[in-house]
Amino acid sequence: MFKHSQLESVKAWLVHPAHAAMPLHTRIQRAIRQLIVDGALGPGKQLPASRALAGSLEVSRDTIETAYAQLHAEGFIDRRVGSGSFVAEMKEFTSGRRLMQRDTLRDQTPNLSKRGDAMFRSGGVREMLTPRPFAHGVPDTRSFPLLLWERLERQVLKEAGSQALLHGDPQGAEPLRRAIADYVNLERGAHATADRVVVLTSSQQAMTLCAHVLFDPGDRIFIEDPVYYGARKAFDAAGLDCVPVPVDHQGIMAERITADPHKAKAVFLTPSHQFPTGATLELDRRLALIEWAARHQAWIIEDDYDSEFHYAGRPTACVQGLDPHDRTIYIGTFTKALFPGLRIGYVVLPPHLVKPVTIARTLLDGHTASIAQLTLARFMEAGHFGAHVRTMRGIYAKRLEVLTALVREHLADFVEPQTPVGGLQMPCMLTGGLSESTAIAAAQRVGIELLGLSALYAGDDGRAGFLMGFAAYTPHEIERAVKKLAHALHAVRTA
Ligand SMILES: Cc1ncc(COP(=O)(O)O)c(C=O)c1O
């Protein structure tokens, strides 16, 4: 006989949408097999009579007979005439549950390399699949011109035909590399040509590639403090010795780097809009770092992740365009400017790094998906990219204004908002009353996501606060969520 929970688990299999395409008897057979594999039905355990199970599951007896026959054919059950069906004794088989017991006795961690273990322990960079207010760094995908994109994709498929289905250039489709070079030269003041661009799947991939292609484990690199967690994880996982350098309102304190007597291989920067503080790196500091990199043959890794969205005048030009010594690696992404599911990012490299990086990427993923690259190239060539960014800049500026006003009105007892000059999120510093973890946990309980700031600092003395993403949420959604947050924070304070 089945216990209630076993019967429920078979029923859950039957109705699960992922199993909808399977015939009924297959679903029942798989569900019972899973119970056996998991150890929920041990060897010798009797299965319900087919008539009884048919009644409980409201299916025909034939369906159960077919499922049992298949389980028997696979060796999972024995059928004894006159006495029924029993889970088989399988000598070579260790059930999932027994395996788990053995594992938990030993250690839960699988047998990984040191590098694999470091990656696993870092928890990786997992973005929210369905962003809730105020998840940071998420653009508004609801305003994306999907019909236009679809039309361009159809054009690509019509013109390229089956050619678009073959492998593509690992460096990236040439029309897209050209469009990216034109864009970064014009809008970001970069020095780029199509042959110096490598199209990747993301800036995250760019950071991981840099970490592995340019450095050895133990190499020192300077990073911003606080720092973007995705960069830190990529560098830590590669075994680099990350040296945090404080950030003030003018960006990373470059004099700490230029005065450091120890050798370092690189500095990682988000100079246009420091993550998470929002500071813009001051010009003298940029120039000092360029000179430092040239003198020490070190690299500047410049992550220019959201500079398209600058709300007060034009954003400062990128560091790469100021660097006459070719020591800067410029990283860009379409995650914020278009949509995260696109998975297209890129690097603009010094010429002699193009081949090593391109070859290294072939070991990871070969190349970025060709149809998406060609569609994006068209989107950019026809001016739609510029138009979309302009439209979204207006929408996001308004949302930032709304968020700032609402935070001042409803959350003034808890935080001081630091209105940023650009980007998709606003830092808010806690002003007293509540600890960062209490505030974040209270928000989470009411369906609100806040990214804590203190964990992004290297030491324990980071400033308490959180990031509030605003770009993906309408003014009405922002208002509702701010009020909900205010209510939740007041409630924990008085509890
Ligand atoms: C500073 C910074 N760099 C890079 C990224 C990620 O971009 P991608 O999706 O291209 O990896 C983010 C996303 O939040 C970010 O905040």
Image: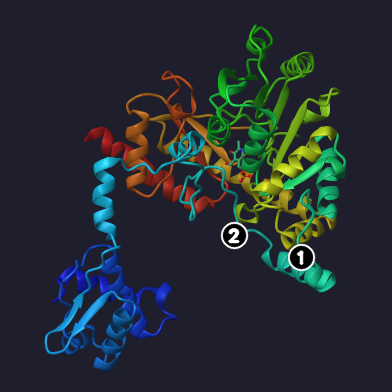
Residue 74 location in percent, x, y? Answer: 34, 77
Question: Could you tell me the amino acid type at mark 2?
Answer: Arg
The vertical placement of 202 against 146, above or below, is above
Q: CA distance from mark 1 to mark 2?
A: 31 Å
Classify 221 as above or below 83.
above
Q: Position of residue 154 (x, y in %)?
A: 76, 71
Q: Quadrant of the N terminus?
A: bottom left
Left or right: 270 in relation to 485: right
Q: Which mark is residue 492?
A: none
Helix, strand or loop status at disc 2: loop
Question: In the image, what residue occupies the spot 24% across and 43% down?
Answer: 105
From what the image shows, is residue 106 above or below residue 8? above
Q: Indicate left or right for 115 with 414 as reference.
A: right
Q: How many marks?
A: 2
User: In the rendered image, which quarter is residue 239 located in?
Assistant: top right
Question: Residue 206 placed where, x, y %?
Answer: 67, 40
Of callouts 1 and 2, the N-terminal one: 2
Residue linked to disc 2: 142
In the image, taking residue 292 as reference, residue 192 lies left or right, namely right
Give amino acid for label 1. Leu
Quadrant where the C terminus is found in the figure: top left
What secondary structure is marked by label 1? loop
Which residue was labeled with disc 1? 166
